[in-house]
Image (cartoon, rainbow, N blue to C red):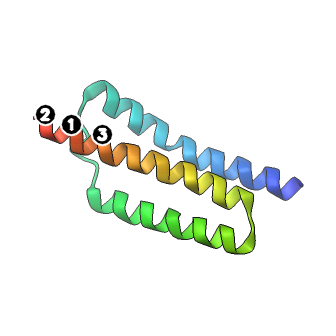
């Protein structure tokens, strides 16, 4: 149980790193400096972590990486939509 909570805490801390970028992008409607390539690699890596988490039956790996992929997709969509406006 300790390691599950430990893993969820570690994952939550990592996921919160997306929040400043999401908020900044939402406020400024600009994500020009955010790379599609970076987001593609991050999303792919997190997806692989999800598969690995399923393989070893690790809730922290699965849950936090699903949330990470969700944040990554949100940023990807925001960048695409905001770049069309300019």
Q: Tell me which residue sits at (36%, 44%) in the image.
A: 75
How far, Cα to Cα, is label 3 from label 1?
6 Å
Percent across and percent down for residue 78 are 30, 40
Q: Is residue 29 above or below residue 43?
A: above
- Circles 1, 2 touching at the beta carbon (< 8 Å): yes
The first of marks 3 and 2 along the sequence is 3
- Report the residue that reaches farthest toward the left: 86
Give the quadrant of residue 43: bottom left
Element under disc 2: helix
Q: Which quarter of the rendered picture does the C terminus lie within?
A: top left
Secondary structure of residue under mark 1: helix
Q: In which quadrant of the rendered image does the N terminus lie?
A: bottom right
Residue most extreme to the right: 1
Residue pointed to by mark 1:
82
Determine crowd level at label 3: few under 14, some 14-19, many 20+ residues with C-alpha closer than 10 A: some
- Rounded to the nearest angstrom, the CA distance separating label 1 from label 2 is 5 Å
Which residue bears the numbered disc 2? 85
Secondary structure of the residue carrying numbered label 3 = helix
Relative image position of residue 47 (x, y in whole percent): 51, 65
Instruction: Determine whether label 3 and label 1 are within 8 Å by CB.
Output: yes
The residue nearer to you, when weighing 43 against 21, is 43
Identify the residue position indicated by label 3 in the image. 78
Is residue 11 found left or right of 44 in the rendered image?
right
Q: Please state which of residues 33 and 75 is positioned toward the viewer in this rendering.
A: 75
Rendered view: 33 above or below 85: below
């Amino acid at each position: 149980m300790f390691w599950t909570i430990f893993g969820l805490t570690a994952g939550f801390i990592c996921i919160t790193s997306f929040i400043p970028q999401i908020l900044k992008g939402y406020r400024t409607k600009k994500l020009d400096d955010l790379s599609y390539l970076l987001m593609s690699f991050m999303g792919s890596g997190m997806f692989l972590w999800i598969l690995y988490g399923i393989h070893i039956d690790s809730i922290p790996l699965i849950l936090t990486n699903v949330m990470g992929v969700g944040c990554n997709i949100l940023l990807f969509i925001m960048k695409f939509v905001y770049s069309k406006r300019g």
